[in-house]
Image (cartoon, helix red, strand yellow):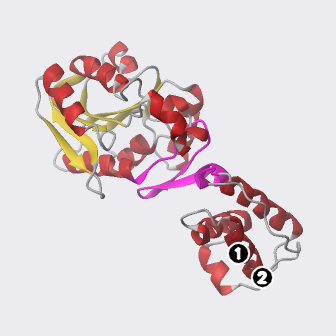
Amino acid sequence: MRALTCPKVKSSSTIRAAMSAARATLDSSATPDLDAQVLLVHILGVDRAFLFTRPEHLLTDAQFAAFRSTLRRRAAGEPIAYITGAKGFYDINLQVTRAVLVPRPETELLLEEGLRLSEDRLELVVADIGTGSGALAVTFVRHRPQSKVYATEISPEALAIARGNAARNGVNPAFLAGDLAEPLIQCEIKIDLLMANLPYIATDELPALEVSRFEPRLALDGGIDGLALIRRLLTQIPTVCRKGACVLLEIGSDQGESVARLVEERMGSRCDILPDYAGLDRIARFRL
């Protein structure tokens, strides 16, 4: 998105006028009305219905100034989740900061597959490798409270966010600091279901992507071909996973064939590639 200057509107603006100004500011957004609604709801502390039922409601000077500030940030391309500090994921809300990747709908597909695989066996030992905001670990344990869920993360800042999200959602997965599955190996923990949404963007592709301007490089950079962290995790899986364990990996939209070949060569396992809603490669699934 290109940054634009907000149109001049008097500070005693109504919701209707503020929304009109926002549309002009966010004209390069694919969803300007929705963006503006989310931001104004955040500023006013109301629900979206309020915007439609009270269009003549007057904003205070402070509210309008704050709204203009959020519009400028959004017009510059900053993700709304970082502006509001929150993101919905599956059926929960998460705090997000620029220390963590903004959770995506594609990762909900990984969660749904994990929940499906655990329907007939609820008391599992589960790992979320590279948990980030805690989206997978927190949501999984809410739906499968009989399971023991571990979450690993190398970033101290991200780990703090994940712990906070667990507390806000009333669950208590075991968070472990460290690289990939190494903390689990050190503690001799054996896993029945392993989930991971690791960085999978190739290093030289990052500079051209909008996502690299705001989201943490640590959560994006997958090395020369985008598969460096997946390769490293595959070397750890035989040690950390029980025989018969299931592994779910989120992958890039063009990585299905490469990941399936890696798994078959290194693990001796058949790897199924599951598509996302657009029909693109998204989840690699295999059993030991």
Q: From the viewer's side, name the closer residue of 93 and 268.
A: 268
Residue 124 placement: quadrant = top left
Q: Which quadrant does the C terminus fall into? A: top left
- 40 within the magenta span: no
Pointer 2: residues within 10 angstroms few (<14), some, or many (20+)? Answer: some
Image spot of residue 276 (x, y percent): 29, 53
Question: Where is residue 97, by image quadrant?
Answer: top right
* Image position of 200 with respect to 83: above or below: above
Q: Residue 19 shows which numbered tag?
A: 1
SS category of the residue bearing label 1? helix
Which image quadrant for residue 91? Answer: bottom left
Q: Is residue 3 left or right of residue 13?
A: left
**Circle 2 SS class:** loop
Vertical position of residue 254 compared to residue 241: above or below = below
- Residue interval drawn in magenta: 77-105
| Amino acid residing under circle 2 | His
Instruction: Say which amino acid is labelled 1.
Output: Met
Q: How far from the left and from the top, in percent, is residue 66?
A: 79, 60
Q: Which mark is residue 57?
A: 2
- Left or right of 179, for residue 216: right
x and y, in percent, of residue 177 in the image: 48, 22
Which of the numbered marks, if any, corresponds to residue 38? none
Residue 219 shows in the view: yes
* Lower sequence index among marks 2 and 1: 1
Q: Is residue 214 visible?
A: no
Q: CA distance from mark 2 to mark 1?
A: 12 Å
Count neighbours of disc 1 (C-alpha within 10 A) and say few if under 14, some if 14 to 19, many if 20 or more: many
Query: Is 91 inside the magenta-drawn segment?
Result: yes
Residues at marks 2 and 1 touching, judged by CB atoms closer than 8 Å: no
